[in-house]
Amino acid sequence: MTSPLTTAPEAAVPAQPAPPPADGAASLSGFARGGVANLAGAALAAVAGVGVTWLVARGLGPHAAGSFFAATAAFVLVGGFARLGTTTALVYWPARLRALGRPELIGPCLRSGLVPVAVLGVALGVAVWLGAARFVPDYAAPLAALALFLPVVALSEALLAATRGYRMMRPTVLLEKIMRPAVQLLCVGGLAAAALLSGTGAAAQTWALAWVLPYVPVAAIAGFLVWRRWHHEPTMTRSERAAARIEGRPVAGAFWRYTAPRALANAAQTALQRVDVLMVAGLAGLAPAAAYAVAGRFVVLGQLANGSIAQVVQPRLAETLAVGDRAGALRLYQTATAWLVLISWPLHLVVACYADLYLGLFGPSYTSAAPAVRVLAAAMLISTGCGMVDMVLSMAGRTTWNLMNVLLALATMVCIDLLTIPRLGVLGAAIGLAAAVAVNNLLPLAQLSGSLRLHPFGTGTRTAMALAATSFGVLPWLVRLVVPSQPVGAGAALVLATGVYLGGLRRYHDRLGLRALLKAARPGRRNTDQAATQG
């Protein structure tokens, strides 16, 4: 664990004592309430995301859709560099400073993170706009259109992270999970409808603009919320800010000492999710890149659930670890992992069993990617089974470890992709990503277990894994042997699996920690955890 925050003798504002760890039941209850809201928003975002992918795949055709997917992948990849790892630090520091009674230092921390993100976002946006035609001519037009919005997108994610550091979950749910995906779906849907009515389709760059424009109001609203909350914190004079210390360092120094390893790790983590699409586009062509992007769409659905739970866990883990409450951190980690397995494993198992049916929704030209879907589904079972392990490592202050893990995973994926994509195409990219996912989850899992005695495999997690695997893995496989025809057999399998699953949830609800989740979902209940309701 990192050393406790300290203030140098010359700092003008004395440190306040750290609050005691929160009561376990109250903390879990507050976590559940935030998790329910975030998961509901993630469900809406998932539906909108699938809708956008479906519209692009159907409306543009494989080649033009590949151009769109490659451009957005490159844009998100560059955006990962522009954020400089601050999406973790802007949760970690406000939560930690509040837990240790130093809220007056939050403002200087926010300035230390947000200003460099804005400056680098502008610089990278200009660089991408100028260099797109030279370096990636196949999808230069949509990428150049997106580049103009790079600083807006980078700031929007950093500002939303800062709201979560204040335990404001509503902005992330309402802006990032509901408003932005819904507006994206409406904009892209409008283009598809116009193309259908006129008989002529818009260029890929127009679709890219429709996809990126909704980030503008999100950034504006998030910025206003952070500014308003910032000005409610205790203030310091300029001389007091200059004299203030965190862990014996100036505020900006402490902020970037924690954040610097995470900046590269965040960019590498984004690369793990996006660079394979670019490698498929470069080594196999735009049409295979579109097929791979469609094949991996369900992975994004699972990541939405993971991100939704992690966003609620992050500030609470930072607080519990800051005050040395390892038992509370273990309880949060294991409960969050059990819920993540309950939500995501059914999706991954069903998609693996009915990969051809899933791909057929996007068009017959994409069904050849079914083997890649099954490989990716197996990788996602490993990933979600370990929980948000890299985030736990970061909240414990082990950002350098996290950096090395992500870089090793990225190197593994790139090496395997270079060897397999030219021969296996989309399947080769899936194998590379699966290997990277295994490295990026099993290695930090061993590090957490060895150094902090934290692991996700509590009773609830083991029960969730067994229940999901039986209901949505074994039963659909048996039904498919008896009723091989689709979609009739798939429908029968899903009905049977859902019935067994719901029965298991009812039978083991205490073991799975569902009582707090069900209480949180009841309408009209007030949150007894005052901090969790802010925002």
Image (cartoon, rainbow, N blue to C red):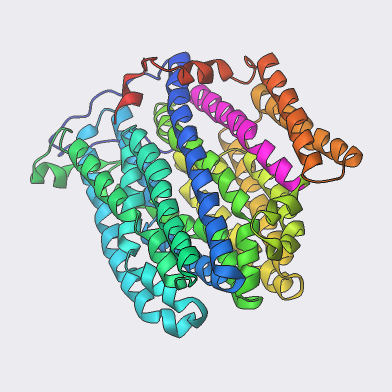
Residue positioned 44% across, 42% down in the render? 397
Q: State left or right for residue 441 relative to residue 87.
A: right
Q: State left or right for residue 252 relative to residue 445.
A: left
Locate residue 310, reporting x and y percent: 49, 37
Q: Quadrant of residue 507?
A: top right
Q: State left or right for residue 384 relative to residue 498.
A: left
Q: Quadrant of residue 79?
A: bottom left
Residue 344 included in the magenta stretch of the image = yes
Up-down relation of residue 385 to residue 421 (above or below): above
Type of secondary structure dominating the magenta stretch: helix
Locate residue 191, reporting x and y percent: 43, 62
Locate residue 372, reporting x and y percent: 73, 58
Residue 302 included in the magenta stretch of the image = no
Query: Magenta part of the protein: which range?
Result: 325-352
Specify the farthest residue to the right.
482
Up-down relation of residue 513 to residue 455 (above or below): above
Q: State left or right for residue 178 relative to residue 445.
A: left
Residue positioned 35% across, 34% down in the render? 170
Tell me the quadrant of the picture where the C terminus can be found: top left
Residue positioned 54% across, 39% down in the render? 305
Q: Compare residues 78 and 212 and report the one nearer the observer.
A: 212
Q: Can residue 250 be seen from the camera position used here? A: no
Locate residue 172, reporting x and y percent: 37, 40
